[in-house]
């Protein structure tokens, strides 16, 4: 009985290996199709939105730093005030009634390990009041291990906290909203993006940062109205997509700024 049993197991193993190879081949072909459909009609350079926003208001500017990938950099926005950083700076200034100085360290195409380099380029004495990190989409599409993504996210949060910043993390958006990506690859990257977002949430909380679940906050909007929410390449947000994303982040960014300003006032009175 032993030889037939081994033969059956060998047959099952061969069939499983063939199935896995077939699935990988299909997914590889679909990834190539998605890359051709998306292309790079927006180029690779985002708008420069770094400036003091709400300059006419009284008070010392709030220092706002934005790190991460193309979403954080604002690729797809048509004007600098429509970028994620520009919208956050304007909204923060309006609610706090004071100027906001925006610094964008985010770079198009970045993955979580690139946060190290973005931090390294900051001036040594730079101390933001609030730092916003949005990263993860490229980690998923480039199949970066979740453990690698979260390790670098944790290191970035720790560095920013050392600089005295309050940190807000916008977790990985739902990549299942990307219509140019065919099925079943779209279902797979949707699942992978959810897994990464959950891990980012846990990592952010453990490190003392505030996570914002972009998948739940704005994911349904991108799924329901992709023509309005996505830009020309159907991959990056449109001005409306950035507006909704900023609206989801702003309450947490505002609370973080209030905490930072309170700490600044307390330090000044000592």
Image (cartoon, rainbow, N blue to C red):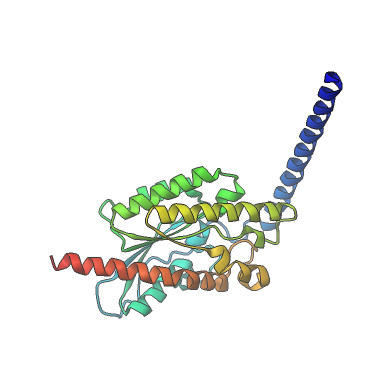
Residue located at (36% from left, 70% from top): 255
**Residue 121 in the image, given as x and y percentages of width and height:** 36, 50
Would you place residue 258 above or below residue 1 in this image? Answer: below
Would you place residue 14 above or below residue 143 in this image? Answer: above
Residue located at (60% from left, 66% from top): 219
Residue located at (56% from left, 74% from top): 240
Of residues 174 and 234, the one nearer the viewer is: 174
**Residue 188 in the image, given as x and y percentages of width and height:** 68, 51
Which quadrant would the C terminus be assigned to in this image?
bottom left
**Residue 98 in the image, given as x and y percentages of width and height:** 30, 77
Looking at this view, name the residue that lies furthest to the left: 270
**Residue 263 in the image, given as x and y percentages of width and height:** 24, 66
Q: Is 58 on the left or on the right of 115, as rendered? A: left
Which quadrant would the N terminus be assigned to in this image?
top right
Q: Quadrant of residue 187?
A: bottom right
Looking at this view, name the residue that lies furthest to the front: 1
Of residues 41 and 55, the one nearer the viewer is: 55
Of residues 99 and 42, the one nearer the viewer is: 99
């Amino acid at each position: 009985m032993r030889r037939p049993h081994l033969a059956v197991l060998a047959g099952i193993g061969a069939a499983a290996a063939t199935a896995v190879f077939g699935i990988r081949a299909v997914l590889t072909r679909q990834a190539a199709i998605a890359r051709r459909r998306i292309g790079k009609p927006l180029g690779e350079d985002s708008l420069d939105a770094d400036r003091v926003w709400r300059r006419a208001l009284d008070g010392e500017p709030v220092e706002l730093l934005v790190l991460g990938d193309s979403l954080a950099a604002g690729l797809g926005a048509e004007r600098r005030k429509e970028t994620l950083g520009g919208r956050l700076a304007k909204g923060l200034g309006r609610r706090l009634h004071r100027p906001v100085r925006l610094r964008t360290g985010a770079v198009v195409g970045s993955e979580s390990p690139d946060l190290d380099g973005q931090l390294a380029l900051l001036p040594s004495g730079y101390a933001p009041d609030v730092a916003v990190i949005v990263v993860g989409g490229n980690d998923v599409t480039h199949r970066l291990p979740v453990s690698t993504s979260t390790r670098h996210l944790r290191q970035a949060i720790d560095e920013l906290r050392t600089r005295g910043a309050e940190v807000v993390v916008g977790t990985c958006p739902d990549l299942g909203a990307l219509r140019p990506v065919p099925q079943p690859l779209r279902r797979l990257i949707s699942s992978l993006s959810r897994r990464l977002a959950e891990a980012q949430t846990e990592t952010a909380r453990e490190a003392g940062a505030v996570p914002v679940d972009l998948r739940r906050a704005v994911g349904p909007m991108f799924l329901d109205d992709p023509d309005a929410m996505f830009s020309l390449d159907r991959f990056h947000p449109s001005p409306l997509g950035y507006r909704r994303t900023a609206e989801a982040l702003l309450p947490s960014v505002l609370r973080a700024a209030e905490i930072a300003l309170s700490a600044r006032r307390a330090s000044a009175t000592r």
